[in-house]
Image: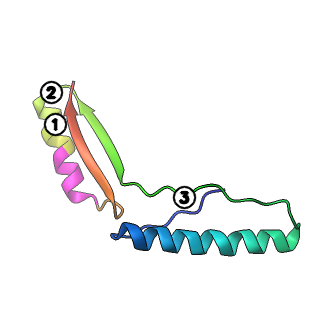
Amino acid sequence: MTVRVEDDDRDAAFRRCASAREGLVERLQSIEKDCVSAGRIAVAEEIEYYWVVNNELREEVATQLERTRLPKGVIAHIGSC
């Protein structure tokens, strides 16, 4: 199971994730005690890569990305093959 939190501030994201994870573990343990444990928390930016083969396609992908609202923290990178 994954707890996912999005925030522009890395420390705030970590604290919110830790709190959400703690609440989730408590709820699950109320159902079945000592059967639930939590792993580490990782804070990272998400990057989406788009690889294109020619300039025409590159311009089309760039135009589509400009019109698309990416989730907070997601960075789109267009590379060339």
Mark 3 — residue? Answer: 41
Residue at the farthest right position: 32
Colour approach in the figure: rainbow
Counting residues from the start of the chain, the first of labels 3 and 2 encountered is 3
For this rendering, which residue is in front, 2 or 79? 2
Position of residue 71 measured from the top left corner of the image (x, y, whole percent):
36, 62
The residue labelled by disc 1 is: 58
Which quadrant, please, contains the C terminus?
Answer: top left
Task: Say which residue appears at 59% left-offset and 55% top-offset.
Answer: 40
Bounds of the magenta segment: 62-68
Q: Are marks 1 and 3 in contact (CB under 8 Å)?
A: no
Camera-side mark, 1 or 3: 3
Q: Please say if 18 is above or below 58.
A: below
Nearest the eye: 63 or 32: 32
Q: Establish if 60 lies above or below 7.
A: above
Dot 3 and dot 2 residues touching (CB under 8 Å): no
Q: Earlier in the sequence, mark 1 or mark 3?
A: 3
Question: How many C-alpha atoms fall within 10 Å of the one at disc 2: few (<14), some, or many (≥20)?
Answer: few
Amino acid type, residue under disc 1 in the picture: Arg
Q: How crowded is mark 3: few (under 14 residues within 10 Å), some or many (20 or more)?
A: some
